Amino acid sequence: MGSNMVSTIFAISWAILFVLGLLIFRGHAPVGLKRKLWAPFTIGSAILFVLFSSLLLRGRLPWFFYPFVVLIVFLNLRNTRFCETCGSMQTSRDLISRPRFCQKCGHDLTALHEAPLPK
Ligand SMILES: [Zn+2]
């Protein structure tokens, strides 16, 4: 497969993943579904990214590429929460902290087992 073909398939796949991600995680899907799909989506995207990068660079990825991707996946999984009350996706602005309160409704995101407030 030529590298132009790989780049094109990579760009199309990435665009599809981006739109799917927006529809599922930023849209109105049930919070349970968002939580269930977040890890497979994030890990699957990372695997796809590594595969395409490897194809484009013909397997000559620098050694630090893999731990860097693992770190990004870890931070994405750790620093993303879905609000129990409004279903909104919340990510932290920095690399270290996890979001504690929902920016949309103010719900405490650390109270994971709390029943949702009646509407
Ligand atoms: Zn909320």
Image (cartoon, rainbow, N blue to C red):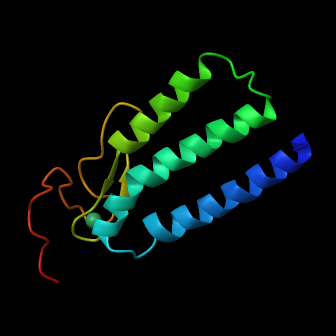
Given residues 37 and 100, the one toward you in this image is: 37
Q: Is residue 40 left or right of residue 23?
A: left
Seen from this angle, which residue lies furthest bottom? Answer: 119
Seen from this angle, which residue lies furthest front? Answer: 1
- The correct choice, above or below, for 32 with respect to 64 in the image is below
x then y, percent, for residue 113: 10, 58
Ligand 1 is located in which of the four quadrants?
A: bottom left
In the picture, which quadrant includes the N terminus? top right
Q: Is residue 63 left or right of residue 112?
A: right
- The correct choice, above or below, for 40 with respect to 22 in the image is above
Q: Which residue is drawn at the image coordinates 61% and 23% (left, top)?
A: 65
Given residues 73 and 59, the one toward you in this image is: 59
Quarter occupied by residue 96: top left
Q: How many marks?
A: 0
Q: Is residue 48 left or right of residue 4?
A: left
Quarter occupied by residue 61: top right
x then y, percent, for residue 16: 65, 63
x then y, percent, for residue 71: 46, 29
Q: Which residue is drawn at the image coordinates 75% and 59% (left, top)?
A: 12
Seen from this angle, which residue lies furthest top? Answer: 63
In the picture, which quadrant includes the C terminus? bottom left
- The correct choice, above or below, for 82 with respect to 32 in the image is above
Q: Which residue is drawn at the image coordinates 20% and 61% (left, top)?
A: 107
* Residue 43 visible here: yes
Quarter occupied by residue 104: bottom left
Q: Which residue is drawn at the image coordinates 52% and 48% (left, top)?
A: 44
x then y, percent, for residue 50: 63, 36
Given residues 35 and 85, the one toward you in this image is: 35
Given residues 25 and 54, the one toward you in this image is: 54
Q: Is residue 97 left or right of residue 108?
A: right
* Residue 26 visible here: no
